[in-house]
Image (cartoon, grey):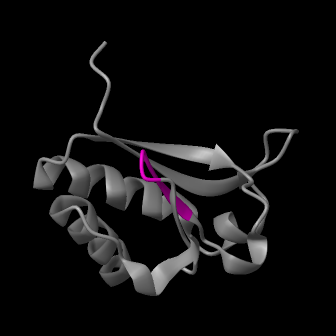
Amino acid sequence: MKKPTFHILVCNSYRISGDAQGACNKKGAQSMIQYFTENVGDRGIDAVVSATGCLNVCSQGPVVVVHPQNLWYGGITTEEQMDEILDAIESGGVATQYLISE
């Protein structure tokens, strides 16, 4: 298997029981996963998009983490914000206005 250049993690608030019930899921994380997946492909970005369990920063959700840079973005609720994150990935930069951790 070829390792992707980037891994985009989208908190979907899965709990130990397997149910998505937290803040990120309630704020639309499921549709974010689809949007990122489609746009990564359309842009030709070498990335995998994955849903995660709760990342424990509910107050700042929905949360997106981009690896390998370990960039944590919070409050991502619009397609415009997701596009800015994807633009940053493409340019090798950071969407600093959404960072919740450095």
Q: Name which quarter of the figure residue 27 lies in.
A: bottom right
Q: Position of residue 35 (x, y in %)?
A: 34, 61
Residue drawn at (21%, 70%) of the image: 87
How many marks on residues? 0
Q: Residue at x 72, y 56 (%)?
A: 55
**Image position of 30 (left or right of 39):** right
Relative image position of residue 82 (x, y in whole percent): 36, 72
User: The C terminus lies in which quarter of the figure?
Assistant: bottom right
Residue at image position (76%, 71%) is 58
Q: Nearer the viewer, residue 92 or 26?
A: 92
Which residue lies most toward the top here? 1
Q: What is the magenta segment's predominant secondary structure?
A: strand
Residue 30 image offset from top left, x and y in percent: 53, 58
- Relative vertical location of residue 41 with respect to residue 102 in this rendering, above or below: above
Residue under the point 26% across and 60% down: 89
Nearest the viewer among 75 and 24 is 75
* 69 displayed left or right of 89: right
Give the extent of the magenta segment. 64-69
For this orientation, the residue located farthest to the front is 102
Question: Please, which residue is most extreme toward the bottom here?
Answer: 97
